[in-house]
Image (cartoon, rainbow, N blue to C red):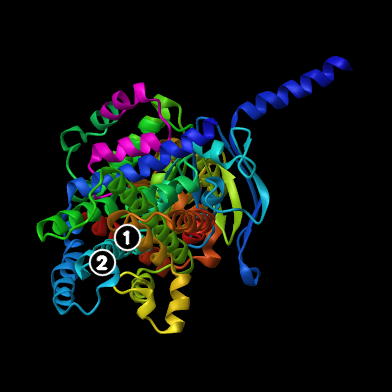
Amino acid sequence: MNSFRRAVASAFTIAEIEARKVRHDSTELWMRTVQPALWLLIFGTVFNAIRGIAPGGYSYLQYIAPGVLAQSVLFVAIFYGITIVWERDVGLLTKLLSTPSPRISVVVGKTLAAGVRGIFQGIMIFALALIIGVNLRFDPLDVAGVFFVVVLFAMCFASLSMTLASFLRTRDRMMGIGQAITMPLFFASNAIYPVSLMPPILQDISTYNPLSYVVDAMRAMLLTGDYANLPLDILVLLATTVALIACASVLLKKLIE
Amino acid sequence: MMTATIQTTERSAVEEAAIAVEVSGLTKAYSKGLKAVDSISFEVRKGEIFGLLGPNGAGKTTTIKMITTLTRPTSGSVRVFGVDALVSPQEVRQMLGFVPQAISVDGDLTGYENLLVFAKLFYVDRSERNKRIHEALQLFGLADRADDLVKHYSGGMMRRLEIAQALVNRPKLLFLDEPSIGLDPYSRMQVIDHIRQLNRDFGTTILITTHDMAEADELCDRLAIMNLGKIATTGAPRELKKTVGGDIVTVTVRGAWTGSVPPDIGSVVSTENGVLKVLTPDGEKAIPRITDYIEDAGGVVESVSLNRPTLDDVFMKYTKASLQQEGSFTEARSARRSISRHGK
């Protein structure tokens, strides 16, 4: 039990390191809000005006707001593998792994940090939605639920990214894989259009795409209030996250060998 | 009979208590059968500064990585203060501090924060933490820069901060991999002073790897020279220097003189054009006796010089076969790069 408490404490310390860095220089955090803002303000507004896609009687802006949030969290999380490779290159990872803190704390701590960045993205996108008058259900419990999903989702993809880093080992390759994964995941999901509009093959792919479950959960809480799929969404996400964190923790050592 | 047995076990317990690191039959093999470390055994005693020397690629860093549980050995065993590193790696890491070759402080945090987060990762007691951090910053001359981001520090300051981490976490055993590489002479001196201070004031056992033979000679109580994955020799610097021969006294003589010295001073190596070379166990004591002898015999001594064997000679003797000049260049360059990268 004592060792479990220590592992948790260490994970929070690792996350604290990230938080302190952001406090010293938050430029990156603000830059990260530019892309989702463009999706909402330009893409969203234009398609909203066309009224081509209006699923379930919601406006298009209402429809994509949860999708844009999920996408921006995905982008934040998927680059955590680059961070860990960079830390390996400058010797920080060796230093972290030579402390008595367990490997899993390092991984969980990093993913938690990704979650905190995700929450910041969420706040910015909510603020933007309020400003441009997108009507979402801002019920406190729902918002809390959305943040929970955001954190879990960020942890999921940050650990995926760190798992990949153990195999790919260089920053350049991680940049490449980051680009290669994010866009297909985004387009083969229900983030910016309903799955029913996709060709059948893409529909199948979308069933295996964790992003679809995330967007579905967020949409349930922010838009429809229909929680029927919520348990499944969260279960899929939780199971994937636990599996990937385990993978990343076991493989982390490969990076410094 | 009975008492004899008890005595033996007692003695071995005492011996064990005096040993910080016990490495035996340690091997690290990579694929293709290449052995980075080939069945080495050595001991580091409690409270000493132990040097691990050797050319690049000799296996020093791999050895350190295995002791610090960062890499799993292919075979062999490591015990740190009696704890098996393969069985309880976390318990072993709790006793260790590690300063890797590349500067590994976090440039995006302040000096204070660097010490704070690593103290937390080492589970330093909350009530002790701040006191120790401020003490360490004070002692290492970093107090007035404590709240600056480390990326604005000089290379020497970064190194000092890394060693200050050891002062906060109080490891029983501190590993330093090339601690002074890429530093200017003044920073180097400061770093060495601090290492000594840790050893003297806190009883920290220190294991250091270095290419700098003068540094090893001055700092280490005992050392091991590694070559091609094996331990070539171990001993105190003084003993090792004896193995490459004694001191050579060179005397330039003018005037009438037979060209010999009494055998109890030393043996004459050569006499050419009035230059006499004498091999002797202790050069400093031999000099006045040699000059007195020559002047008594009617010669005039013009100049005397003393040449003692250095650790360089020892190093060359045991590693000549595999020494590659190019290697140490790239290593120094990469360390310098790592310092400048943090500085950006």
Front residue (pair B282, A131) = A131
| Side of A121 where A227 appears, left or right | right
Q: Camera-side residue: A202 or B321? A: A202
- Residue type at mark 2 is Tyr
At x 37%, y 40%, the residue is: A12
| Residue at image point 36% right, 53% down | A149
Q: Is residue B256 visible?
A: no
- Label 1 is placed on what type of residue? Arg
Q: Answer above or below: position of B27 versus A34.
A: above
Dot 1 and dot 2 residues touching (CB under 8 Å) = yes
The image quadrant of residue B294 is: top left
Q: Earlier in the sequence, mark 1 or mark 2?
A: 2
**Residue beneath label 1, please?**
A219
Local packing at callout 1 (Cα closer than 10 Å; few below 14, some 14-19, many 20+) is many
Q: Position of residue B217 (x, y in %)?
A: 43, 43
Q: Are marks 1 and 2 on the same chain?
A: yes
Q: Position of residue A77 (x, y in %)?
A: 34, 60
Residue B179 visible to the viewer: yes
Q: Residue lying furthest top in this view?
A: B3
Q: Which mark is residue B169?
A: none
Residue depicted at 37% across the width and 70% down the height: A174
Horizontal arrangement in the rendering, residue B210 relative to residue B38 (left or right): left
Residue beneath disc 2:
A63
Chain to which the residue tagged by mark 1 belongs: A
Lateral position of residue B133 relative to residue A9, left or right: left
As measured in the structure, the alpha-carbon distance from the residue carrying label 1 to the one carrying label 2 is 8 Å
Which region is colored magenta? B106-134
Say whether residue B263 is magenta: no
